[in-house]
Amino acid sequence: MTDMADLIKLTAAEIAAKIAAGEVTAVEVTEAHLARIEAVDEKVHAFLHVDREGALAQARAVDEKRARGEKLGPLAGVPLALKDIFTTEGIPTTVGSKILEGWIPPYDATLTKKLKAADVVILGKTNMDEFAMGSSTENSAYGPTGNPWDLTKIPGGSGGGSSAALASYEAPLAIGTDTGGSIRQPASVTGTVGVKPTYGGVSRYGMVAFSSSLDQGGPCARTVLDAALLHEAIAGHDPLDSTSIDAPVPAVVEAARNGSVEGMRVGVVKQFRGEGYQAGVIQRFDESVALMKELGAEIVELDCPSFDLALSAYYLIAPSECSSNLARFDAMRYGLRVGDDGTRSAEDVTALTREAGFGDEVKRRIILGTYALSSGYYDAYYGSAQKVRTLITRDFEKAFEKVDVIVSPTTPTTAFPIGERADDPMAMYLADLCTIPTNLAGNAAMSLPCGLAPEDGMPVGLQIIAPAMADDRLYKVGAAVEAAFTAKWGHPLLEEAPAL
């Protein structure tokens, strides 16, 4: 039998293999991770809700399946941390907001259903920036999450709880959502792997909406193969989601098992470096590009001028869509209700509820979006931003005529101290400089570790971008880089696990 303390250090693929072979039970694996959460999460604050009884019940069901001789899926019995933006029947879904505090959904999101169908054990719901609005998980109504590499620093946002759960060995798998980089940016600053699938590749049904044309759920893990296994489990067409792609899921697991960059054309965009980029981040990125060249890739310089406008366009489109989506939180149907004492109008109750229930960043974006959509300003702001979005998409199309994938740093800097950018929204927004263009175009992208910055010893992420529906290229390149990197320098998380 595997020692309980060793179980939390195994990859998801290794855990699933041990459960399938009968070397360990799913209950033992779940108990080991629940014990880890109990031991360290008071410091990390990765979880908003731990579903101990539910997780153990799911684990027991896996063990019973195996006892009956039923074939187990590739991730059966593997624990997972679920971002608190996906509805889960019977346990709270708060989206990191006071306005949904204590709300228990009556149904499962499609992604939640797929996880359960794959016999993945859902440990609980992870902390996040309120309504996924943020780059640091400091905007959660329930307090910030710490980066397991340095608890005084941010774990990324908005999915910092999911990335922190992975980096602190509280879970081998996690789910995040990516509207402007909220899977990739947390992965980068915690030394983990995060993938934003092609827009529409994973169902959004039951995922609380922030910006509907940008939001995308995706896998988070500690290795490229684990991310591929999870990607395959959650992806696929869903008739309940009108934006879901009705096409076969790319062969991501096969690509992750057969990593190679030999003969591939890898693009480096000149707009993804320069002022504001940390020296150690650029150093590790340049080493990664050199490594790919060693592995047989052809490096191609690219010029994508519209990428310089991506941040501005995003911060008009996303707030505009959020102001529309969050109008449903009116105190009338579900969630928080303030001031309903029989003397106030419905309008007053709605206003009081939103004042009490929404945090500063959410209010900032609602106000900005409502202004951008208002009469007289729609064409000047929202309309212009959508034109820029088209230009960005065209720049990607031209680039992908010359290259198979594009690479860049995932974030311009490593994790910054909690509170450092809290009063400077513009500085906070710059954390998503490299990730936003992909969301605007709907392409697939991955972040994987490429070492530690010499200045501060904190993780650096390498971003790989592929065309829409070519998600398998991410895994093919990512697996090759991961293998070569580990052979040359050691895996930053597996070899130098942060002390808690």
Image: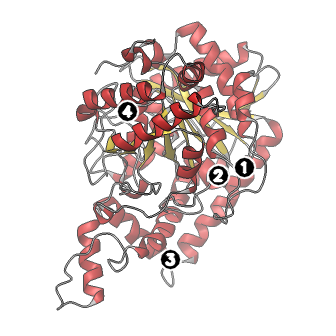
Q: Quadrant of residue 418?
A: top left
What is the tally of numbered marks visible in this picture?
A: 4
Q: Earlier in the sequence, mark 3 or mark 1?
A: 3
Label 1 environment density (alpha carbons within 10 Å; few <14, some 14–19, many ≥20): some
Q: Earlier in the sequence, mark 2 or mark 3?
A: 2
Tell which residue pokes out farthest to the top in this image: 488
Label 3 environment density (alpha carbons within 10 Å; few <14, some 14–19, many ≥20): many
Q: Which residue is mark 2?
A: 306
Dot 2 falls on a residue whose secondary structure is: helix
Expressed as whole percent of the image width and height from the top left, the position of residue 114 reads 59, 48
Q: Could you tell me the amino acid type at mark 1?
A: Asp
Cα distance in 3D space between marks 4 and 2: 27 Å
Expressed as whole percent of the image width and height from the top left, the position of residue 233 reads 63, 41
Kindly identify the residue that appears in the image at 52 percent across and 25 percent down. Answer: 449
Q: Nearer the viewer, mark 3 or mark 1?
A: 3
Q: Could you tell me the amino acid type at mark 4?
A: Ala
Q: Which mark is residue 395?
A: 1
Q: Earlier in the sequence, mark 4 or mark 2?
A: 2
Q: Which residue is mark 3?
A: 373
Cα distance in 3D space between marks 2 and 3: 23 Å
The answer to whether marks 2 and 1 mark residues whose Cβ atoms lie closer than 8 Å is: yes
Expressed as whole percent of the image width and height from the top left, the position of residue 461 reads 52, 29
Kindly identify the residue that appears in the image at 28 percent across and 70 percent down. Answer: 336
Cα distance in 3D space between marks 3 and 1: 26 Å
Kindly identify the residue that appears in the image at 56 percent across and 44 percent down. Answer: 115
Label 4 environment density (alpha carbons within 10 Å; few <14, some 14–19, many ≥20): many
Q: Which residue is mark 4?
A: 415
Looking at the picture, tell me which residue is in the foreground, 133 or 249: 249
Determine whether, in the image, residue 297 is placed left or right of residue 410: right
